[in-house]
Amino acid sequence: MKVTLFQSQIPNFSRQLTNSAWRLSLIGIILSIFFIFLSGCQGTVQKNDGVIHLSLWQSINPPANRDVFNKLVDKFNQTHPDIQVESLFIGQPQLPKILTAVVGNAPPDLVSFDPQLTGQFMELGAIRPLEEWVDKLPLKSEISPNLWEELKLDGHLWSIPLYTSNIGIFYRPKLFQAAGITQIPQTWEELRKVAKKLTIDRNGDNRPEQYGMLLPLGKEEWTVFSWFPFLLSAGGEVVTNNRPNLMNPGAIAALQFWQDLLKDGSAILSSPERGYEEDAFMAGRVAMQLTGPWTYIMKSNVDFNAFPIPGNVKPATVTATGNMYLMKTTPAREQAALKFLEYVLSEKFQTEWSMGTGFLPVNLKSTQSQAYQKFIQQKPVLKVFIDQMSVSGFRPIIPGYSRLSDSLGRAIEATMLGASPETALKQAQANLDSIWDSQPSR
């Protein structure tokens, strides 16, 4: 699994957009840089054949998942001769390409991206709210209600879910057995004890050949995403009334727990910004790893299983949701694009997509379908993540999330490198306060 499934690789300049004037100025600069790119993309959709040709920009990785998606797009095209969707892969950096297209009045019709960019797209007026359309949609009740809530901002629904999943803990059963562990940890304290038992220094050089757990080192979105289940389990939050709020007991407790695992010597840090890599787990150098069912581990030959995130104040995890935006174009194009979005939400699409990628269906009928239930029997570890959906929270989608995530990621990284959680979060909060206070519109 590549982290680009979850991580918006936002260039530094996009994090520095502090007001509309600066935003438009900077986007004007990159408009010229991507003029050729846009011209090429426009050429694929302007055809005078009586058919509405829609452009869909996506960054689906790995390529195997992209193939599954494109095959499903082809199936839509075969059954809708009056609407033809062209799926275009856009590589990094994705965000400036999308923003440039919007400002240049040449947006794609549909975009598959991360929900965390919703606030920025909303502020630019680039996307259509979808709640009125969804309320009239016959299959609205088939979609998990939690997902609709996740994609709402300021009372409006700004996108639809393409897929969902959540994060749990994969483990090596043989290593558990060798360490005499017979019970799966259900609390933080139990997880801490299990991690210690699984940390083994075989030659006595104070350098364990096996660690209990891998924790991500870095400040980018994978680190923030991996830490969020512990924040939510501790009853913490990072936003109150659309404003960053990092100095709360839950946030401090979640950071302290990660630091405690390191102080115990029971966890090892990943290489910088590579916390999603699974080599150490596959080789047996770590016994537990934070990830989800999209992981390559699911296709490997090593022994593995998974268990829910152990709870503190309450059981919790965080969703890994991908979404699709309807961009502002013309009424006719938008209506055609809505037909494709309805197809994406359908039981048939969701069943085939989920079985092909490892993500969980967003359609409840798909989850209950005979085909998917048979698939679960072949991959029973999926039930862990399906069951966790009922306690899944999500990351905010407010405007300025990229800055919030960046400051929070720096606080997590500083704590992993020895700073106290209170000090790291206090500094991050001060940075965010200065940003938010300079923007009266927030």
Image: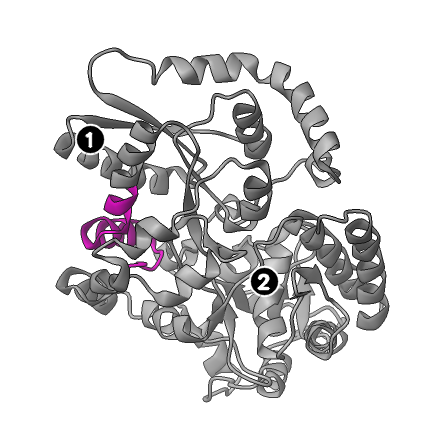
Q: Percent position (x, y) of residue 291?
A: 50, 62
- Principal secondary structure, stretch drawn in magenta: helix
Q: Residue at x 28, y 23 (%)?
A: 53
Q: Is residue 268 above or below residue 154?
A: below
| Closer-to-camera residue (284/408) | 408
Q: How is the image coloured?
A: one colour
Mark 2 Cα-neighbour bin, 10 Å: few <14, some 14–19, many ≥20: many
Residue 214 spot, x, y in % from top left: 61, 65
State which quadrant residue 141 falls in.
bottom left
Residue type for callout 1: Asn
* Residue behind mark 2: 226
Q: How many marks?
A: 2
Nearest to the observer: residue 63 or residue 227: 227
Residue positioned 55% across, 40% down in the render: 121
Disc 1 marks which residue? 77
> What is the magenta range?
341-363
Q: Is residue 360 magenta?
A: yes
Q: Is residue 8 left or right of residue 297?
A: right
Q: Earlier in the sequence, mark 2 or mark 1?
A: 1
